[in-house]
Image (cartoon, helix red, strand yellow):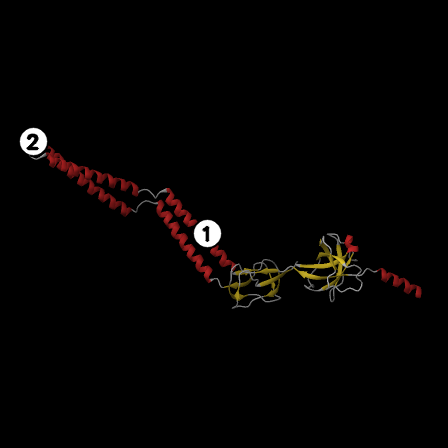
Amino acid sequence: MLWTLGLAGCGAQREEAPMSGYLEADLVYLAPSSGGTLRTMAVQRGDAVVPGQQLYALDADPERLERDAAQARRERAEAQAHDLREGRRPVELRAIDQQLAQARSALQLSTSAWRRQQQLVEQGYIAPIRLEELAAARERDAARLRELQAQRELATLGARRLEVAAASAEARAAGADAALAGWHEGEKQRMAPVSGRVFDVMYRPGEWVAPGAPVVALLPADALKLRFFVPQRALPQARVGSQVRFSCDGCAAGLTARIRWVSPQAEFTPPVIYSNQSRSKLVYLVEAQPDASAALHPGQPVDVRFGEAQR
């Protein structure tokens, strides 16, 4: 009987002491890019959310007004660019045509008077100076006709190429301002990017939210990680990709995790770890991904052991 107890005692001594660790979560903090008053909060702590579900909304009236103003500037610039590409309106062309008719009549009249006076000068009835005056009037009416003909031709053309390009560039700039204002408006309300649960809510409706201040913290389904400290002598067993077993108070049996990162730097045993069986002051931080995290919670202390789970 004593021999049997002795063997059991030796087996118990050979049982490796568990390594201390805890569960930690990589939370997703959702914050607005600009400040504002919190209008609505659509979720509470513990709520399950799916991608695309609205979480909160801030006052977006300033961004909406800015977007409307930029949209109006874009429409004005586009209309101006379109107008510059077109010629004069038909009614304006008809007005120029009437002026052309008046100029032709005036030229015909001055030409006719100049020819009649030219015959009278040759016959000696009037002085040559009168003929010079009529010739000048004829040239004036001819120049006026050529001016109106050029205006008529110009009226059928659009504006200069650089003017059209400048108006088009102004329209694009206003469109970019409208898109930016729309983006700022969209940032005032936030949707859930991933599935998970609402871990914390930092503000309540009516409070002012500063730019970049998290409003909601989400706990994604795969955000839990196991962090434990491996003594220096056991470091060769901590290989990335290998499996470890862990247990915690009130948790199901047979929990496993897979190592995904091993710290390359040693550190002293943190004071938060209490273990009477610790044999080394130097430890290495190791992170592992739990294979199942449905019933686990951030902050839970765990005991970790190397080795595959028994089946």
Q: Residue 33 in the image: x percent, y percent?
A: 53, 58
Residue most extreme to the left: 125
* Residue drawn at x 27%, y 47% as measured from the top left: 92
* Residue drawn at x 38%, y 45% as measured from the top left: 164
Image quadrant where residue 222 sits: bottom right
Q: Residue 201 in the image: x percent, y percent?
A: 59, 66
Which image quadrant: the N terminus?
Answer: bottom right
| Residue 151 seen by the camera | yes
Q: Earlier in the sequence, mark 2 or mark 1?
A: 2
Distance from disc 2 to disc 1, alpha carbons, whole Å, reads 78 Å
Closer to the camera in the image, 251 or 127: 127
| Res 176 label | 1
| Residue 112 seen by the camera | no
Mark 2 Cα within 10 Å, few/some/many (few <14, many 20+)?
Answer: few
Which image quadrant: the C terminus?
Answer: bottom right
Residue that label 2 marks:
123
Helix, strand or loop at mark 2: helix
Mark 1 Cα within 10 Å, few/some/many (few <14, many 20+)?
Answer: some
Q: Residue 232 in the image: x percent, y percent?
A: 77, 55
Image quadrant where residue 199 sits: bottom right
Residue type at mark 1 is: Ala
Closer to the camera in the image, 146 or 20: 20
Residue most extreme to the top: 122
